[in-house]
Structures are given as structure tokens and as C-alpha cells.
Amino acid sequence: MEDIRSTAAALQAPFDEEATRKSLAAYVDDFRDSAVVWKTTGRPGDDLSYRFYKRTRTDTLATAIDAGLLPSDPPLAPLINFWSSLYDGAAEQSCDFTARTGLDKTWVWLGGTRPATDVLDAEAVPDALRRTLPAFAWAGLAHVRFLAVDHRHHSVNIYFRVQGPVTPAQCANIVSLARVAPLHPEDVVEMRGFMPQDYGVSASVCLDTGEVARVCFYALNVPEDRLPRIPERIATFLTTAPSYDTEGCTVIGWSFGPGNGTYIKAERSCFGDMISAFERWSCHFSGSRQQDPALPG
């Protein structure tokens, strides 16, 4: 609790003690047994978030309902339960929280790199989201690894793995999904210097309209002594958010969207060995030349 309070204060991020206390109490066992990370953005006033990554299969949705963090019949429960049922029980749930509101998102790790058609083209998936499949395929986003369902905004973050390395043309196609003009080639070169060969991209999609609000390119386990250009708020975050892991882990994300949707985000390990959690999921770290065999050759 005090780490959340003090880190939020350092970032001038909102903090609600009651919401935080209820979330920590509801998921006390999950926090104890998971890898826990901090997250924020470079935008002034944005939330301080924290997340646990589970290592075992559990029903985090039921925990939220029992604790009164969600209504007894959450509108997005059928979608979460469908994705959690895929691949013979390989999927695992985790949770995102903010220091302002408590429970924010339910994460589903699909147990591997999966065809987007399996995940998004099903009866349980809202029609607006299903209609995005052709656009995602056109942009090269055809394989999904994670999903994060946002209970407050009725949206979903879809985490794809893309065959790389990223090029200006490939990047232009992806950011165009969020109605963003092609990036300057030098900016793509900078991102590519930190991203792995086969890389991760997320798309944030409104479940009511299918509109892509933003896309984000990720670099995992970026060396602390070799960071890209970051705003002052991210620098403050990386030096203030406490990490108790023997081997720390920093994640940088470049987000692109209309208006204020273009910004830098960052994650920092807190405790529970984030590195081993990422390795268990076959995540590709910054600078890696790994190639995902699930992607077409």
C-alpha cells in the first residue's frame, strides 16, 4: 500500500486508498504468488498502474465478483470466459489495477502464439471486434498472444506478435489502423534498435464500435543503461517505483493514436521475478533475434 501511495505521489498520479485496499485484499494470494509490475505513461496526470502475472490457472473474474469489485453479472464476462476456455485450458488470467480505481482490466494469456481467427472470429466475440479481422490481417497482425479486457472503458487490448524486423512500411500500415500518419523513418529506426526481431504490437479496440484507439510497439527487458529517449515523467517513474527483484526488468512502449494517443509508456518489475514470467511465456527481449515458429516463414 505505501509503495503504491508514494510512487503515485512522486508521479503526481491519482491515488484512492479505499479502492487500492479493496483490490489488494481481494487478490492477496495472487499478488503473493505472481510476478508483479508497475506501469505508467509519460503523460502528466496519467494513472499509476500495477499488474500481477499469474503462473497458474485461476478464475480472477470470480474473485472480483465475490469481492464486489465487479457486478454479479459483468457485461464482459462471457467474452473473458470464452477466451479463457480456449486451447484445452492453456489460457491463464491475470489482472491490471490503477491506484485511482482499483481493478481495471482482466488479462488472458492464450498459452502461446495463436491465429487471430481462432481468437477473434467466434460467436462469443462482439460483431464490432470481429469486423476488425480483415484490417488486422492487412496490416500483418494475424497472431495473438494476450488480451486485456478493460472493464471501465468497454474495450480490449489485443497483443499480437509480428514477423520482423519492423520496417517503415510495416509500421506505417500498423499505425494507420489508428488513423495516424506514417512515422518518420528515423523514429522507426530508433524503435527497431530496441525491439526484438519478431516483435509485439498491441491494438486497443472499442468493443462497441470496433474503432482502434491506438497501437503500441513494445521492447521488453530494455537495459537500464541503454534506454531510448523517454520523457521526464518516465525517467522519474523508473527511478522511483521500487523493485525488489534480484534481476530487474524494464519495458518500453511507443503508443500511437489520434490526439493525445501518442506517448511513451513504461513498465518496471516490482517483485516475483518478472524475467522468469516472460521467459515462461517465450517473450522476446529487447535486441533478440529470436523467430517465432508459429509465424509463417
Image (cartoon, rainbow, N blue to C red):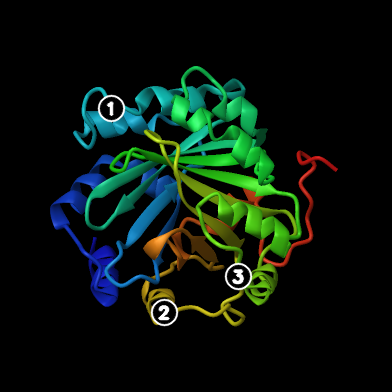
The front one of 129 and 236 is 129
Circle 1 or circle 3, nearest the eye: 1
Type of the residue with mark 3 = Val
If you read the primary sequence from the N terminus, does the residue marked by circle 1 or circle 3 appear first? Answer: 1
* Quadrant where the image shows the N terminus: bottom left
Mark 3 lies on residue: 222
Total tally of numbered discs in the picture? 3
Q: Residue at x 21, y 64 (%)?
A: 14
x then y, percent, for residue 82: 48, 22
Answer with the quarter of the image where residue 112 lies: top right
* Callout 3 crowding tier (Cα within 10 Å): few <14, some 14–19, many ≥20: many
Question: Which numbered disc flags the more N-terminal residue, 2 or 1?
Answer: 1
Q: Position of residue 211 (x, y in %)?
A: 44, 42
Q: Secondary structure at mark 3?
A: loop
Q: Is residue 244 left or right of residue 118?
A: left
Residue 276 visible to the viewer: no
The answer to whether residue 122 is above or below residue 187 is above
Percent x, y of residue 137 = 66, 39
Q: Residue at x 54, y 35 (%)?
A: 132
Residue beneath label 2, please? 239
Residue at left 32%, top 62%?
48
Front position in the image: 236 or 247 = 236
